[in-house]
Amino acid sequence: MSQLHQRTASPPLVATLTLGCKLNQAETQQAARELQRRGCRTTDRPASADAFLINTCTITHVADRKARRLIRMAQRLSPDAPVIVTGCYAERDSDAVAQLGRVRVIGNQRKDAAAETVLEELDRRFGGPTATTTETLASAALNTAGRTRAFLKIQEGCDDVCAFCIVPHVRGRERALPIDDIVTQAQSLIDAGLQEIVLTGTQPGAYGRDRSDGASAAALIEALLSRTDAPRIRYSSIQPQDITPALLACWEDARLCRHVHLALQSGSDQVLRRMRRRYDASGFREAVERIRAAVPNVSITTDIIAGFPGETESDHRATVELMESVRFTDVHVFPYSPRPRTSASLLADDVPIQCKRERAAELRALGEAHRRAAIRDQVGAIHSILFESARAGLTDTYLPVRIEADLDLTNQIRSVRVERVDGDRLVGLLLG
Ligand code: F3S
């Protein structure tokens, strides 16, 4: 028996901690499943553990700071435990991560080997193989207890290279996974008891653009709907240029969640051009109309950057006007900050910080008012709810709902009629 097992008297516990986007969450979940298959227990809560796998993000300087804080916290929680750091911050600035000491850094290029690296480090630190018993394997299964949704990676990389975005620099060019592999993985997650498959990627809307076998987002979703038993599939992040009649037709199947995340970034044509986005404001409005015509009661959410270089007051007003006309269900607003290696970092960052903050605050307040109105509009509507806890869950349109009955409906999809609104949440009556 290894020293580790003598020390813990149970399979090693690996804390898998994730910062950043759904793609990062998909990759961490994949590594956690591999670790469970190889006899480890995993937790996604910061805890005293035998090893840490930290998957970082570098989308903003705040994300970098959070990564450093998480690494230091892991080192404090378990001073003997190996800390393996991967993800976009590790890829962009491996030296800064290494300087934190007592870490093993693996960039995005080698991320598929993250679980193997954790096992190697456990063996090196505590000696002997981390013995895998059948009992451990059986109890680990996919360790999906308490989980209702799985993030599934369908592609990685981005060929668009928007001026402000660090992601193409740390994720490389587009690489889509084959449809058959995605279908197989999705079905095994459903077989393990998960109810919803969330399709993730750097640029999921561009799925298949790099392949010569005719793969497209529409073909992928049709395959998932026809060849798996997935009760719910969520495919949300797209851009106006990704919308095709075949893709819109996929929403005729109610298992595809009626939620589209269409990142706007700015409502000003001049700013969109400088950002190197592939649409203008009227193209964006038209995309929203096409989605709403094809998908009744759809939720449309967005991201906006406030204070991009050269953004004038009238550019900002164009964003406000576009928000007023579209009325998004949710808006994430980011004050612009330059990222190293991006072409926008060569432009003068000329919007004063106070002005960026004021514009961001105005956009957030407007987004919040629209969100409250969108929530109020649901009173009387019937939704299918995936319960993430005993009495609370999410509509397929990604709105939070609770019921007042004394039942445990965790991980069930049930029909609910919305009766009223309580703060930011819908309150409903269970129908069946
Ligand atoms: Fe962050 Fe990398 Fe995702 S920079 S947003 S974790 S692709």
Image (cartoon, rainbow, N blue to C red):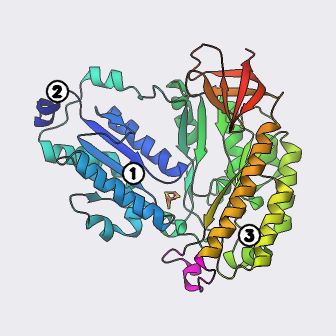
Instruction: Judge whether residue 343 is colored magenta.
Output: yes
Q: Nearer the viewer, mark 3 or mark 2?
A: 2
Residue 418, image quadrant: top right
The residue to which callout 1 is attached is: 112
Question: What percent of the width, then of the height, locates residue 284?
Answer: 81, 62
Pointer 1 residue Cβ closer than 8 Å to ligand 1: no
Instruction: Judge whether residue 387 is colored magenta.
Output: no
Q: Amino acid at mark 1?
A: Asp
* One can see residue 228 in this view: no
Dot label at residue 278 = 3
The relative height of residue 369 versus residue 317 in the rendered view (above or below) is above
Question: What percent of the width, then of the height, locates residue 342?
Answer: 54, 77
The residue to which callout 2 is attached is: 9
Question: What percent of the width, then of the height, locates residue 116?
Answer: 29, 46
SS for callout 2: loop
- Which corner quadrant holds the C terminus? top right
Tell which of 207 and 334 is nearer to you: 334
Q: Badge 3, how many Cα within 10 Å: few under 14, some, many 20+?
A: some
Q: What type of secondary structure mainly makes up the magenta span?
A: loop
Q: Amino acid at mark 3?
A: Arg
Which segment is the magenta one?
338-353
Q: Is residue 27 left or right of residue 139?
A: right
Pointer 3 residue Cβ closer than 8 Å to ligand 1: no
The relative height of residue 201 versus residue 222 in the rendered view (above or below) is below
